[in-house]
Image (cartoon, helix red, strand yellow):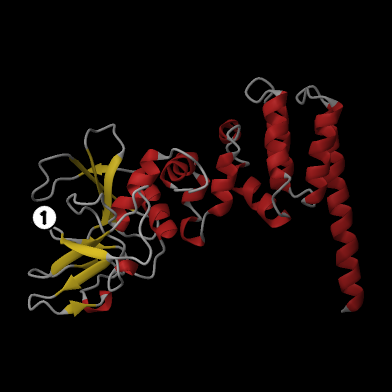
Amino acid sequence: MLTSYFQSKVGLRQTTLVCLLLFFHALSNAQCNRSNVIKNEITVLSQKTGATPNVLTGLNTMCGMTSEIPDPDFVTIINKLKTLAVVELNTFFADFGGAPTSFVEFKDVSLIDIWKGCSNGVVISKKNIAFLKTLKQFKLDLSVTGQTFAKKLYEHIQGIGKSGSKSKGAHLGSEVGGIHVRVKNASGVLQNITDLPKNSFGARQLPTGFILEVAQYTKNPNGTVKIPLTPTYQVKSISPEGHSFFPETMTYDQIIEQCAAAFINPSPVNWYGNNFSDGWEAPSENGMIIRWHTLTTTSDPSSFFPKF
C-alpha cells in the first residue's frame, strides 16, 4: 500500500508537469499577447493551484482576451485572484472557466469578493454573473458610504422605520419574539415565532386576527438611537393577503442571497390588494417562492417576502 501511495504521488507530479508544459506552450503562442511580467504572474498562479485543467483553461482564455481585458484590468483581476485560497481558486475557475464572457465582468473585482462570500445555499446561483451583480446591490456593508437601496432593503425586511412613521416590512422571522417585533394573538397574548404556522420551506404566516407590532426607538438629538433602548410599538396594518416571515433559522445575509436568486428570474403575479405596484415572484435556489413589489417594472424592489 505504501508503494502504491508513493507511485500515485509520482504519477500526480508527472501529470502536473505535463499540464504546466502545455500551459507554458499556450502562453508562448500569439494568442496570449501579454508582457513577460504578466505571463510570469499567470504562471505563478497556475502553479499555486496545481495546474488543474479548469485553471489552465481559464487563465489561458483570459490571457488571450487582450481587447476585452486590457493589461491594467488583467493585473487587477490576477492580484485579486491571488488572495484566494487554492480550493477557492480551483472552484472559481470551475464555475467560470467555461464562460469566457464572464471574465470581462470581473474587471469589477468586488464581484469576486461577492462570489467568495456566498453561502452553500446558492452554489448554483453564484455561477451566474447576473446573480452576483444583484447580490452586490442587495448586500449592506456598513463600512461603505451611500448604499441607499441596500440600506432601505435592510430596513424594510427588518422592519426599521422612521420615528412616528407607519411601520413597514418586518419579515425577518428571527426577530419575532424579541424586542423589535412582537406578535400577539387575538386575545392579546404575546406569541413566539414557533407559535405561527409554518410551510415546508420554514416560512411562517401571521394567522388571521393576530396583531403585529414593530418597535420604534427614542433617538438622541444627533439622530442616533438612545441606549438603553426605549421602544414604543406601532401596530402594523396587514394587507388582505396576510403577512409572512422568512424562516427564523435564516440570517439576513442568507435571506438576501435567496432573494437575489429569485430576482433574476422574475414572473409577474397579481395577488389580492396588489393595486399600487407591480408584483413579481420566483422560486429561490432553495425552492421557496419569494415575492416582491416594484413601483415600476424597471425600478428597484421595495419589498421582499416569502409566499406562504
In the figure, is residue 209 to the left or right of 227? left
What SS does tag 1 mark?
Answer: loop
Q: In the picture shown, does residue 13 fall above or below 136?
A: below
Q: Residue furthest front?
A: 221
Identify the residue at horizontal 28%, vertical 58% (top origin). Answer: 218
Q: Quadrant of the N terminus?
A: bottom right
Amino acid type, label 1: Ser
> Looking at the image, which residue is at 34% across and 47% down?
153
Is residue 221 at least partly visible in the picture? yes
Q: Quadrant of the C terminus?
A: bottom left
- Residue 2, located in which quarter of the rendered image? bottom right
210 lies left or right of 224? left
Query: Could you say which is closer to the camera, residue 277 or residue 268?
Result: 277
Image position of 47 (left or right of 108) = right
Q: Residues within 10 Å of mark 1 (few under 14, many from 20)?
A: few
Residue 308 makes an appearance in the image:
no
Image quadrant where residue 239 sits: bottom left
**In this orientation, which residue lies closer to the viewer: 95 or 230?**
230
Residue at left offset 36%, top offset 40%: 149
Which residue is label 1 attached to?
239
Residue 146 in picture, x, y percent from top left: 44, 38
In front here: 258 or 11?
258
- In the rendered image, which quarter is residue 296 located in? top left
* x, y percent for residue 160: 29, 54
**Left or right of residue 7, residue 128 in this image:** left
Residue 152 at x, y percent in the picture: 33, 45
Q: Position of residue 298 (x, y in %)?
A: 28, 31
